[in-house]
Each structure stands twice: as structure tokens, then as C-alpha cells.
Image (spheres, grey):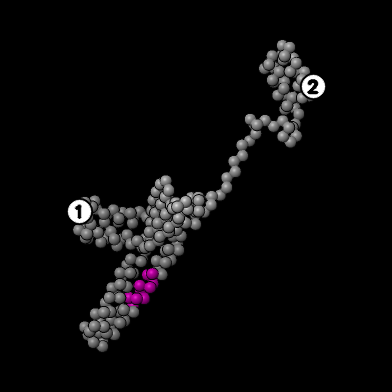
């Protein structure tokens, strides 16, 4: 402790200055003299430092890499459409050749099977939606990730339930499921996919439709 501080403390003790004035003088001395190192650092004014480390892939939240690449799946949809188109053309050629060889023969009737599959496949794969399910859960102390992606022809399904509501359970027939699915399908855009997130204690579920 230097002589200036000691002198001020003695004045405070003798009553020559009030404690408030003495404290202000002590603070003025501290401000006038720059500190070196941590000699006069006060724990009350020391900045708090919080170190944040990135979460481990097996222990943290769902990484950005798990978000579906919607553009890539649209390319897959077009590839499926091309495959079904090729199947339709081949089966149509088979149908014509069978008709020319033997009208109403076995070859002619069998050709309708791949032809119908091709037509149905083109209808469902063109601009179809994709369902992506991302599940992250703890199992035996370890993080388990499940990734499922499959085409979801909402338009075809909604059209089917509109025409055949009797296929639905009795308690759901009055809820216009077909119209609801049709509205969901119209509301989804390529830039704004439908998203549902469920976060429970040991399980995190993300559902994308886009």
C-alpha cells in the first residue's frame, strides 16, 4: 500500500474526512494509476468468460446435414418419371407387337400389366411430394439416428379418398380427409416445405414434406 492510500485511511480513521470522501479519493488514485498484470484486478469487475464448445454429432442436436436436400430429391422424382415413361413405351410396343402377332393373345393381355404400372408411376412421380422423417433418440446411453425418405403422392391420395371415402374408418369419413390432404398439397411450395417437430425427453422427431 503506497503512502497516499495510507494517508487517506488515517484521515478517515481520525475523522478528518468522511468515509464517503475517503472512498472517492481512493478511487481517484486507482483511476490515476494504471494497473499492470492482475495486481489490482477486482474479482467483482472481472469479465465472465464462457467457453462454448460445439456439440458432438452423437450428443448434440440434429446437425444441419440432416436437413433433406429437396433439390436432389426433385431430381430423383424426374429420374423416376423417366424410368416409368420408358417402361410405358416398352410395354406399349410389346402390346402392339402382340396384337399384330395374335390379337387378344396372352402376350397382349400381359403387356397391360407393365403398361398400367408405367402410367401409374408417371402420374405419381411427376411433381410428387417427398416425406422425410428424421428421428434422433437415446438408446442404451447412445444417440441413435434414423433417416427415412420416400415419395408421398399427396395429390393422388387425396383424389383417391375423395372418390372412395368408404375406404376410411367410419369415424374419419365425415372429416373430409381427401379435401384436407388436397389443401395441404396446395399449401406446400418448393421453398417452404411442410415441417413438424416433436421434441420429447429422449427423442427428437422432425418431419418434412416437400
State the image quarter where residue 151 is shown: bottom left
Element assignment for label 2: helix
Compared to residue 18, the image places residue 1 above or below, namely below
The answer to if 191 sits in the magenta stretch is no
Q: Can you say which quadrant of the picture contains the N terminus?
A: top right
Residue at x 75%, y 34% (from the top left corner): 36
Compared to residue 10, the image places residue 172 above or below, namely below
| Residue 2 pos. (x, y %) | 78, 24
Residue 120 visible in the current orientation? yes
Q: What span is colored magenta in the figure? A: 80-89
| Residue 113 pos. (x, y %) | 27, 75
Compared to residue 110, the image places residue 185 above or below, namely above
Compared to residue 119, the image places residue 207 above or below, namely above
* Relative horizontal placement of residue 103, taking residue 144 as reference (left or right): left
State the image quarter where residue 33 is shown: top right
Nearest the viewer among 20 and 1 is 1
Amino acid at each position: 500500500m503506497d503512502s497516499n492510500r495510507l494517508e487517506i485511511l488515517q484521515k478517515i480513521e481520525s475523522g478528518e474526512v468522511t468515509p464517503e470522501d475517503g472512498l472517492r479519493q481512493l478511487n481517484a488514485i486507482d483511476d490515476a494509476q494504471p494497473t499492470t498484470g492482475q495486481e489490482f484486478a477486482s474479482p467483482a469487475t472481472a469479465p465472465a468468460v464462457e467457453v462454448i464448445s460445439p456439440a458432438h454429432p452423437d450428443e448434440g442436436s440434429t446437425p444441419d446435414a440432416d436437413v433433406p436436400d429437396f433439390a436432389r430429391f426433385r431430381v430423383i422424382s424426374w429420374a423416376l418419371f423417366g424410368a416409368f415413361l420408358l417402361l410405358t413405351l416398352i410395354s406399349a410396343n410389346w402390346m402392339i407387337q402382340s396384337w399384330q402377332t395374335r390379337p387378344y393373345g396372352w402376350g397382349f393381355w400381359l403387356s397391360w400389366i407393365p403398361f398400367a404400372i408405367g402410367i401409374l408411376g408417371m402420374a405419381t412421380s411427376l411433381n410428387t411430394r417427398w416425406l422425410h422423417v428424421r428421428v434422433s433418440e437415446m438408446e442404451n446411453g447412445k444417440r441413435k439416428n434414423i433417416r427415412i425418405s420416400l415419395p408421398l403422392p399427396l395429390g393422388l391420395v387425396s383424389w383417391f379418398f375423395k372418390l372412395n371415402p368408404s375406404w376410411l374408418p367410419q369415424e374419419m369419413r365425415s372429416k373430409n380427409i381427401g379435401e384436407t390432404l388436397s389443401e395441404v398439397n396446395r399449401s406446400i411450395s418448393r421453398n417452404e416445405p411442410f415441417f413438424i417437430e416433436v421434441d420429447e425427453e429422449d427423442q427428437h422427431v422432425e418431419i418434412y414434406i416437400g
